[in-house]
């Protein structure tokens, strides 16, 4: 009897075990898929490609003195410092390694397997963009060992290697995006690409533009090749219609413009003396820029002023302190139309036609071709005025349109558009600041570092960045040096990858002031 | 063959035996099981202690009741057998529930278990029975999240061993697992990854679901402390098990019982605030670093007026009884609880309906069905940052906080700060910001016991534990909490259905030789647990006061399904040598759905032994009765569902799409294992008048799965679930029970529980420097980080940097201390050195007086509330702000580690250099070695007799009065050292001992009556 019942129980257990695997197979996460169609990986990556630089722009924008964060003491970033133990200034680190990260690897693998050369080209652009922005912000970064979930220690690669990799990826993208064979499929790409609607020819132009900017960063090196820069710009955007602009649909918090009042990220920031000076006439012979009243914010009395970044609180009486970037005093503006890029629904660019024209102008001038430089420079200023008008129509923002007459009068001023012989780098780089104000933080900071913030124009002897003065009191950890890079993301690297950081000197108190390879000769 | 097996032995000369079962004091004992030895024929005593059973002369009646010594009487000529049962706590003959609903005699147990009677629990009048366990069981620690009605309580047995997962024990009700979840805010739409409105289990609280049980329905609670005792329950019982047995219908006469309870509560403590310096908004926040108050300034006592005296009312009604032939018993009961909190606007109300029937269908079939229904509604307020307590403290004492609305009915503002920077008025906060939860739950359990063989029986239990938990969290558009997004509302409906089946074949004890007997069981179980949470969030209110998602502009939703299945097979064999040497070996194999196939089947054994030396050497028993025991067990534990495969999640960024979540893959995930042993002894002296139970244990967990451990983002992910942590727990538990007085007219009993425990982290996965649960990082830079060599309950933080002589480093430019910019150990440990609970039960005539004292020594508490008040200039420790001082330390000038460091000589005046307070280290507010003495419960009851009973026409009735948490003596400077900055949902050591804006436990006076018909 005992044997029988034992057998019975063992039998029952055995039957259970046989159907066990099927019964236990409930560990496929029902809340989310493990793999999706290749084009569905794209929208979040495109979102972050444009938006992530804005996150960090809160901080980089203080290095470049587009804005300041007034408070009861000077903020660390206003003093070219950083926030210890914080991830501030490393959103792009997060998005390159995580938001793109494995998603991009998977998307590219699928695109490759499915012969979707257009999507793969877009993927290579994303990859190149990632290394470009992280190395420009942080210098040495992790490239070779990146995106490997089996590792827990990651060696840093040199910036030179990162730059080579960006070039390789862009070259590859340019080849891929010209292909029409395989499964190149505009509607398929358009499902994930709401920026260019799946048009690979526009992506191709973007790749050329990125390669032009890449090549132009070598301006301090003997290998600098202005002709290559000009050639790539010419293959790139042909007009403002090619601008890479992200739309913010405003269906929930995450797809609202980061600079919109609802996101509340910029409400307490104020414009600086530097940015106001570039447009108020102070730096351009008294010619008031019509864009000032369309991009910046007046004080309650209607005048345009900037805060002094060296004075606690900005140095202006409350009554004449500039309004917030939305155009309202204090924290006002909730639910009301904003100004320029500072609106819930304003589109934000990654790269613009106007920006590339300034890149071309700089390269041409450095190559000694003043006429070509002037043409590109004039085009840059002119088309940025059009860009400002277009942006202020994105969501019915409060500023009026710049009229044709205003624009013509402005462009007619020799203070703004000099003769070819009188055109200087100072014109080009200072106007480029205006064209990149509010969105082009990475490139603007790169420009300033390339010219060591305060280099003088070799021809006119005035500052390349007119009116830019570094903070008088630098952050204590700077030891008197200007900021050159942002530390790698704290919660990624300083906590979990310290040994590798140590090898590149990343644990030094002054690490953020160590000049990067790309700006050294 | 079947018929042959089913033939029950027949006795010709059966007769009806009746009698009365009483305690030593002569009090009738109800619910005592009366069993004919060697058969399954049984009955129970009724409320008057009377029983009636058919038996034959020569048969032996066994009288068993949990917590008493079993008595045996042989049926002889008399038809009446009266029995007195001895109430015992450590007696070897006591009957205890062990794993899987089995009962056994204490003597056979090789492991530590402890029993609390349902009456003891119910008499504390705590709504959540978990809170009644503190101090009653050695090794059990209950941490209530706050003093708000419906607050979650976490319970740990033998300390914290898991770094990131739950350390709570398995809850078992009538043999099947019971859900004790506390809602994790991770399922809310507000907490979607990357969200800026996440709660992260901070500032909110929800009930732990065990609180759905009405304490009045509990017959006993047995605590199986270690893996040794609970090994048969499997992987969910790695942290011990709490085994609840609910009341059953009593055979005999039908009974009607009514009881009620009324309580008045008020708050015990209030913090002291300075009244010298006035407010300022310099710095962008309301603080009290302003000019001194003018003479004659009128102060309002906002704090005293805020708290209210709270009333609680409970009513319980039960009917129980059985059919005439004693074969079908029933119990139906209803209970209501209506609890208001001392914080206005808070409440907890519960309705319980319980029914159970038990039928002896025939001689070989017994069926038991129970259903427990509960419905509860809970209104809580926020705590911490956005909560009303900090608002109450920070509100200007020169302003009447009761005046909180403008004439237009909107939030009255008192500063020019932004709406988000000005703290909410506490009255405004409790009225506008709300946490509401409703829960509908049904636990049903169908048990069938078949006795087809003479040598054993088969018991099958089928159970479902299902509930719908609706939560609504509002952050009002005008409040500081919700203004940035113009109001936000979260709704989450959690639908849970847990199905359980368990089959056990019991083999009765049979003699192998004259002295050696064997018994055992084999069985299997199937569990299928599923929870689906449908959550949505509405943001940007149209009408600021209309609370509905339909009233919002921006809506997002989210669905979370979590399912886990578990199959198990288990067995146990007990060898019994001459009733004084026992050896039990168990084995269990689990197959879980949450570990990759191939690694998901795992076996673990346990072995335990018990030796009753006083029976082996009867000569000793004149002085001492007792046993020694030893046990060893291994227990595996699986991962949470979906832990090893990364999954894509919908991204709410522009134009949707998919992207990976934070957590990376780990295809090599394997189960973790705990190895544990314990040694113990139970000794009884003076004829059971004095009992001692001592246990030492040591548990080591290896390959421990650490959830959400961080790595470099270069992995492509942010978090990982990894094996590789090792933790060790060891401790000593002592229970001393004495009955100094035992007479017919009265008795005095003392039970003392003592525990000293340590938990230590020995290793972390991949040699990572620190592991922490990010939810616990809730104020300043302190969190529950642990690292190898530290306690499992340590704290890490941005503590002071020190030189090689331990002197604080001072910044030569500011004169202020330099703090670490990474989380470091500061030598803090929230683990108490020891805890003790002392119960006194005194009976004099018809009066019963009982007390429970709760004593703790050691353990650190972070007083973040005081830290907050200091940074805001409200703490009395900021009164000397104008006094110049030099902080003791050495300058960080390059010579700090040389033999002659430069002593700090920089004078700072805090009033001028506000960084003195705002940059101050959390270290100054972690209060070390916090002790307490707490009078948890005091109770006096009187049993009515004679005329009053006649007037009531009642069979019995009693009146009582009791006090809850009446007295607290502690060296903690805050309101109450029992706190949890998060909720019981947070794993690892959680945020217990982090006190930030938390409401303390109130003190209450209860009174009521109990009457039976």
Image (cartoon, rainbow, N blue to C red):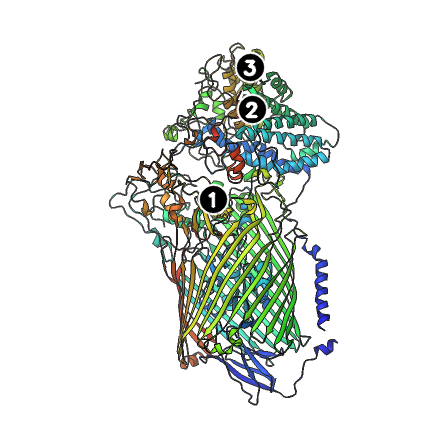
Residue designated by label 1: B482
* Mark 3 vs mark 2, CA separation in Å: 26 Å
* Mark 1 vs mark 3, CA separation in Å: 54 Å
Residue A503, compared with residue B368, is above or below; it is above
Which one is in front in this view, the residue at disc 3 or the one at disc 2? 3
Residue B447, horizontal then vertical, whole percent:
63, 69
Determine the residue located farthest toward the bottom in the rendered image: B77
Label 2 marks a residue whose chain is A
Q: Which mark is residue A366?
A: 3
Residue in front for this viewpoint, B12 or A283: B12
Residue B484, horizontal then vertical, whole percent:
47, 40
Instruction: Say whether residue A248 is visible.
Output: no
Residue in front for this viewpoint, B323 or B96: B96
Which one is in front in this view, the residue at disc 1 or the one at disc 3? 3
SS of the residue under disc 1:
loop
Residue designated by label 2: A387
Residue in front for this viewpoint, B64 or B1000: B64
Residues at badges 3 and 2 in contact (C-beta under 8 Å)? Answer: no
Residue B293, horizontal then vertical, whole percent:
28, 43
């Amino acid at each position: 009897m005992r044997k029988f019942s034992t057998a019975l129980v063992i039998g029952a257990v055995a039957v259970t075990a046989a159907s066990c695997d099927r019964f236990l197979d409930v560990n496929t996460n029902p809340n989310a898929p493990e793999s999706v169609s290749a084009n569905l990986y794209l929208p979040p990556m495109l979102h972050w490609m444009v938006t992530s630089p804005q996150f960090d722009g809160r901080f980089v924008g203080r290095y470049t003195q587009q804005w300041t964060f007034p408070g009861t003491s000077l903020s660390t970033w206003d003093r070219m410092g950083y926030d210890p133990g914080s991830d501030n200034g490393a959103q792009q680190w997060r998005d390159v390694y995580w938001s793109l990260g494995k998603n991009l690897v998977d998307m590219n693998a699928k695109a490759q397997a499915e012969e979707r050369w257009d999507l793969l080209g877009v993927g290579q652009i994303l990859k190149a963009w990632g290394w470009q922005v992280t190395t420009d912000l942080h210098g040495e970064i992790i490239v070779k060992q990146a995106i490997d979930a089996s590792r827990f220690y990651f060696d840093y690669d040199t910036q030179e290697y990162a730059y080579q990799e960006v070039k390789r990826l862009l070259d590859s993208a340019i080849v891929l995006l010209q292909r029409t064979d395989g499964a190149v499929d505009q509607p398929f790409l358009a499902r994930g690409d709401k920026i260019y609607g799946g048009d690979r020819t526009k992506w191709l132009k973007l790749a050329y533009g990125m390669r032009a900017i890449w090549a132009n960063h070598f301006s301090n090196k003997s290998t600098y090749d202005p002709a290559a820069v000009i050639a790539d710009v010419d293959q790139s955007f042909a007009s403002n219609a090619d601008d890479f602009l992200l739309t913010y649909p405003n269906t929930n918090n995450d797809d609202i413009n980061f600079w919109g009042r609802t996101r509340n990220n910029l409400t307490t920031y104020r414009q600086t003396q530097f940015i106001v000076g570039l447009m108020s006439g102070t730096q351009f012979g008294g010619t008031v820029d019509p864009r000032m009243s369309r991009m910046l914010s007046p004080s309650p009395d209607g005048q345009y002023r900037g805060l002094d970044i060296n004075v606690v609180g900005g140095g202006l009486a409350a009554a004449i302190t500039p309004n917030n970037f939305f155009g309202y005093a204090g924290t006002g503006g909730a639910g009301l139309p904003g100004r320029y890029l500072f609106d819930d629904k304003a589109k934000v660019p990654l790269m613009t036609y106007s920006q590339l024209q300034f890149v071309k102008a700089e390269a041409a001038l450095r190559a000694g071709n003043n006429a070509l430089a002037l043409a590109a420079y004039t085009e840059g200023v002119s088309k940025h005025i059009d860009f400002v008008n277009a942006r202020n129509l994105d969501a019915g923002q409060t500023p009026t349109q710049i009229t044709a007459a205003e624009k013509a009068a402005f462009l007619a001023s020799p203070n703004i558009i000099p003769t070819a012989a009188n055109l200087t780098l100072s014109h080009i780089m200072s106007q480029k600041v205006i064209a990149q104000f509010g969105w082009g933080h990475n490139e603007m900071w790169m420009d300033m570092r390339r010219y060591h913030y305060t280099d003088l124009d070799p021809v006119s002897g005035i500052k390349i960045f007119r009116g830019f003065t570094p903070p008088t009191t630098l952050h204590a950890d700077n030891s008197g040096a200007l900021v050159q890079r942002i530390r790698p993301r704290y919660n990624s690297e300083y906590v979990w990858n310290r040994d590798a950081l140590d090898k590149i000197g990343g644990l030094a108190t002054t690490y953020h002031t160590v000049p990067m390879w790309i700006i050294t000769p | 063959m079947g018929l042959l097996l089913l033939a029950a032995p027949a006795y010709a000369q059966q007769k009806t035996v009746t009698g009365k079962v009483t305690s030593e004091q002569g009090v009738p004992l109800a619910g005592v099981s009366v069993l004919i030895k060697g058969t399954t024929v049984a009955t129970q005593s009724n409320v008057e202690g009377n029983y009636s059973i058919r038996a034959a002369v020569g048969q032996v009646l066994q009288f068993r009741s949990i917590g008493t010594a079993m008595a045996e009487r042989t049926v002889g000529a008399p038809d009446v057998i009266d029995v007195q049962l001895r109430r015992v706590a450590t007696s070897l003959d006591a009957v205890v529930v062990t794993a899987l609903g089995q009962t056994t005699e204490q003597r056979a147990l090789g492991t530590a278990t402890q029993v609390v009677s349902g009456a003891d629990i119910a008499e504390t009048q705590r709504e959540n029975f978990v809170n009644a366990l503190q101090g009653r069981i050695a090794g059990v620690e209950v941490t209530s999240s706050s003093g708000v009605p419906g607050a979650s309580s976490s319970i740990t047995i033998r300390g914290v061993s898991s770094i990131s997962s739950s350390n709570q024990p398995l809850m078992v009700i009538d043999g099947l697992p019971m859900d004790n979840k506390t809602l994790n805010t991770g399922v809310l739409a507000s907490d979607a990854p990357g969200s800026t409105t996440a709660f992260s289990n901070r500032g909110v609280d929800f009930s732990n679901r065990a609180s759905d049980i009405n304490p009045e329905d509990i017959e006993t609670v047995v605590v199986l402390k270690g893996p040794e005792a609970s090994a048969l329950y499997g992987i969910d019982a790695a942290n011990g098990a709490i085994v609840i047995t609910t009341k059953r219908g009593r055979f005999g006469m039908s009974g009607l019982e009514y009881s009620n309870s009324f309580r008045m509560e008020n708050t015990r403590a209030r913090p002291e605030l300075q009244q010298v310096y006035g407010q300022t908004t310099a710095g962008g926040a309301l603080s009290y670093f302003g000019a001194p108050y003018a003479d004659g300034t009128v102060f309002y006592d906002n704090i005293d007026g805020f708290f209210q005296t709270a009333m609680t009312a409970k009513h319980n009604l039960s009917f129980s009884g059985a059919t005439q032939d004693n074969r079908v018993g029933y119990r139906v009961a209803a209970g209501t609880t209506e609890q208001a909190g001392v914080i206005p606007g808070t409440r907890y109300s519960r309705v319980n309906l319980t029914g159970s029937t038990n039928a002896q269908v025939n001689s070989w079939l017994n069926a038991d069905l129970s259903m427990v229904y509960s419905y509860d509604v809970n209104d809580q307020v926020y705590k911490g940052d956005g909560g009303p307590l900090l608002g109450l403290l920070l509100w200007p004492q020169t302003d009447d906080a009761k005046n909180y609305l403008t004439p237009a009915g909107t939030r009255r503002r008192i500063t020019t700060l932004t709406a988000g920077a000005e703290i909410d008025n506490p009255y405004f906060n409790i009225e506008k910001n709300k946490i509401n939860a409703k829960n509908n739950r049904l636990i049903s359990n169908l048990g069938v016991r078949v006795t087809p063989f003479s040598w054993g029986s088969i018991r099958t239990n089928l159970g479902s534990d299902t509930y719908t938990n609706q939560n609504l969290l509002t952050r009002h558009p005008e409040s500081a909490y919700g203004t940035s997004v113009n109001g936000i509302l979260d709704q989450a409906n959690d639908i849970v259905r847990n199905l359980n089946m368990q089959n056990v074949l019991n083999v009765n004890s049979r003699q192998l030789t004259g002295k050696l007997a064997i018994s055992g069981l084999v069985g299997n179980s199937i569990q299928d647990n599923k929870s689906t949470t449908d959550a949505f969030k509405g943001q940007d209110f149209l009408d600021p006061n209309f609370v509905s998602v339909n009233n919002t502009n921006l809506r997002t939703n989210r669905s979370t399904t979590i399912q886990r299945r578990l199959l198990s097979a288990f067995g146990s064999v007990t060898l019994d040598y001459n009733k004084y040497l026992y050896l039990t070996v168990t084995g269990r194999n689990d197959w879980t759905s949450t570990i990759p196939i191939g690694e998901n089947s795992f076996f673990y054994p346990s072995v335990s032994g018990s030796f009753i030396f006083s029976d082996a050497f009867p000569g000793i028993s004149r002085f001492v009765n007792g046993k020694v025991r030893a046990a060893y067990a291994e227990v595996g534990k699986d991962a949470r569902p979906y832990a090893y495969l990364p999954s894509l999640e919908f991204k709410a960024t522009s134009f949707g799409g998919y992207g990976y979540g934070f957590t990376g893959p780990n295809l090599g995930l394997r189960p973790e294992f705990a190895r544990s042993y314990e040694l113990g002894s139970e000794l009884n002296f003076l004829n059971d008048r004095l009992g001692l139970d001592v246990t030492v244990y040591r548990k080591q967990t290896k390959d421990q799965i650490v959830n959400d451990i961080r790595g470099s983002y270069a992995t492509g992910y942010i978090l990982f679930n990894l094996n590789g942590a090792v933790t060790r727990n060891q401790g000593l538990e002592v229970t001393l029970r004495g009955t100094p007085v035992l007479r017919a007219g009265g008795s005095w009993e003392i039970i003392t529980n003592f525990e000293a425990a340590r938990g230590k982290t020995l290793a972390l996965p991949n040699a990572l420097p620190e592991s922490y649960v990010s939810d616990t990082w809730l104020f300043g830079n302190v969190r529950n980080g642990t690292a190898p060599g530290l306690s499992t309950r340590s704290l890490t933080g941005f503590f002071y940097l020190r030189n090689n002589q331990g002197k604080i480093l001072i910044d030569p430019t500011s004169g202020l201390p330099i703090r670490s910019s990474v989380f470091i150990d500061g030598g803090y440990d929230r683990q108490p050195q020891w805890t003790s609970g002392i119960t006194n039960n005194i009976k004099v005539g018809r009066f019963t007086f009982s007390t429970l004292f709760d004593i703790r020594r050691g353990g650190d508490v972070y007083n973040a509330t005081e830290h907050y008040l200091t940074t805001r200039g409200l703490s009395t420790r900021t009164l000397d702000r104008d006094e110049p001082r030099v902080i003791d330390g050495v300058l960080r000038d390059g010579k700090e580690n040389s033999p002659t460091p430069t002593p700090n000589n920089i004078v700072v005046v805090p009033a001028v250099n506000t960084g003195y307070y705002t940059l101050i280290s959390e270290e100054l507010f972690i209060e070390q070695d916090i002790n307490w003495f707490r009078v948890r419960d005091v109770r006096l009851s009187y049993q009515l007799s004679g005329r009053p009973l006649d007037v009531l026409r009642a069979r019995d009735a009693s009146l009582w009065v009791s006090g809850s948490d009446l007295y607290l003596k502690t060296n903690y400077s805050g309101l109450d050292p029992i706190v949890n900055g998060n909720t019981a949902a947070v794993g690892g050591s959680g945020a217990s001992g982090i006190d930030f804006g938390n409401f303390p436990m109130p003190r209450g006076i209860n009174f009521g009556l109990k009457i039976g018909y």
